[in-house]
Image (tube, helix red, strand yellow):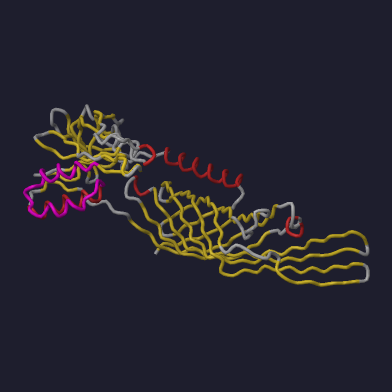
């Protein structure tokens, strides 16, 4: 495994960097509208953040040069911006935990009142609204007789055969069965529906096609976007062994190994927050080559010299969380995550030349009887992206080739990478 101190430093730096950049944001005023309490529609500019979580307030101004005003859900009826409609509402929200470790044995919904902006997904004869709070808990709503009705869903525990089993209270399916009952084929679709944005969006889209309902607004379906490209550059690697044994490895300065690196990547970009967050998956080839000599001298008649060579090449699958931030026409990005490498080729060589009085001996063989076929590690990097080109500096702490608990092998890699997006 990689050195724990190094891993902690890399992990903490990654988390701190991501939190810092995500908390820092630019204003982004684009054309929009607000509808005031008296139902007057005012054209102007909304500070649009491509919200992943429903906003508690918005900034709005009637001309681009004036000072913005803050509006909460109690001060306006709705606002519209970038093909999105948010309506003010006093709603019940389900706040029961979703994590398995925190689930309750009570199947009854646990709700509280809140005042917020609901995002409109479908508006017309039958309507669907969406709310995601700061804890990333999703709630969905239909509208009946002018009121927003919470679609009820709760995960809870139940004891079956002496074991705790996770059960889903899917009352929302019954609610939707009644709400969408003028579509004869809706019952079959409801058998497979789940309480998530993608599933409910597809259900209402099917309903509108089935019933030929008059839709006044339909939010464009939210999808992941992708970027595919290639990487090429250089890797500077260092190797260090730690043990109370293996002096011919521990007491050697292996210096640095500089080798070429190539790879391909697929970046899965989340649709909200202006596409700032993504999961970057890479398939990369990297290698290193180290040589060292350990001299052991007892006296002029008894001495030895041990030469070692360690040369490994890896095919690595890297999974990184990436955050990018615009600076003019350029994006700065940081990413961090895990690497998983399979050894493609391994050189594990030792040559011992020894003298014991008048007896000279040369022995050759393996440096270690066994070496790891798999290496994992932690990655932290930062870089710039301009149009289809990127430049990145990256550090990786890897677990190395040792399989022995009494011998740790620490590999640090520093990457200088050029990227191109097709």
Where in the figure is residue 262, as x and y percent of width and height? Answer: 52, 65
- The image quarter containing residue 159 is top left
Determine if the magenta segment contains residue 186: yes
Where in the figure is residue 292, as x and y percent of width and height? Answer: 74, 63
Where in the figure is residue 95, as x and y percent of width and height? Answer: 29, 34
Q: Residue at x 17, y 43 (%)?
A: 128
**Quarter holding the C terminus?**
bottom left
Q: Residue at x 17, y 45 (%)?
A: 173
Up the image or down, 260 lies above or below 34; here it is: below
Determine if the magenta segment contains residue 260: no
- The image quarter containing residue 121 is top left
- The image quarter containing residue 119 is top left
In depth, the one of 132 and 18 nearer the eye is 132
Residue 49 located left or right of residue 5: left
Residue 124 located left or right of residue 33: left
Residues in magenta, as a range: 169-196
Where in the figure is residue 280, as x and y percent of width and height? Answer: 43, 55
In depth, the one of 28 and 403 nearer the eye is 403
Count of number-bearing discs: 0
Give the residue at the far front of this rendering. Answer: 161
């Amino acid at each position: 495994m990689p050195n724990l101190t190094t891993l902690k430093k890399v992990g903490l730096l990654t988390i701190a960097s991501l939190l810092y950049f995500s908390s820092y944001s630019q204003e982004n005023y684009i054309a929009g509208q607000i509808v005031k309490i008296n139902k007057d529609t005012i054209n102007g500019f909304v500070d649009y953040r491509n919200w992943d979580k429903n906003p508690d307030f918005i900034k709005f101004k009637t001309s681009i040069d004036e000072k913005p005003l803050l509006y909460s859900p109690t001060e306006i009826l709705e606002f519209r911006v970038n093909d999105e409609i948010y309506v003010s509402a006093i709603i019940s929200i389900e706040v029961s935990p979703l994590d398995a470790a925190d689930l309750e044995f009570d199947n009854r919904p646990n709700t509280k009142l809140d005042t917020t902006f609901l995002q409109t997904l479908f508006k017309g004869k039958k309507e669907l609204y969406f709310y995601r709070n700061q804890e990333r808990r999703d709630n969905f709503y239909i509208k009946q007789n002018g009121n927003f009705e919470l679609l009820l869903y709760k995960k809870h525990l139940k004891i079956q055969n002496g074991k705790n089993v996770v059960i889903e209270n899917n009352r929302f399916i019954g609610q939707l069965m009644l709400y969408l009952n003028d579509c004869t084929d809706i019952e079959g679709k409801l058998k497979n529906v789940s309480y998530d944005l993608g599933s409910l969006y597809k259900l209402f889209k099917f309903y509108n096609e089935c019933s030929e309902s008059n839709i006044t607004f339909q939010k464009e379906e939210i999808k992941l976007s992708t970027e595919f490209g290639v990487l090429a550059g250089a890797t500077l690697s260092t190797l260090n062994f730690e043990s109370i044994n293996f002096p011919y490895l521990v007491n050697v300065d292996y210096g640095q190994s500089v080798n070429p690196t190539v790879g391909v990547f697929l970046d899965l970009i989340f649709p909200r927050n202006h596409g700032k967050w993504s999961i970057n998956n890479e398939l990369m080839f990297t290698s290193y080559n180290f040589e060292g000599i350990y001299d052991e001298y007892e006296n002029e008649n008894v001495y030895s010299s041990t030469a070692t060579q360690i040369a490994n090449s890896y095919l690595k699958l890297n999974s990184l969380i990436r955050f990018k931030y615009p600076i003019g026409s350029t994006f700065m990005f940081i990413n961090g995550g895990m690497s998983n490498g399979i050894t493609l080729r391994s050189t594990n060589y030792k040559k011992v030349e020894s003298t014991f009085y008048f007896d000279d001996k040369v022995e050759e063989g393996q440096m270690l009887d066994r070496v790891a076929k798999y290496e994992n590690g932690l990655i932290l990097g930062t870089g710039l992206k301009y149009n289809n080109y990127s430049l990145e500096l990256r550090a990786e702490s890897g677990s190395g080739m040792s399989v022995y608990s009494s011998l740790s092998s620490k590999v640090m890699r520093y990457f200088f990478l050029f990227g191109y997006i097709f």
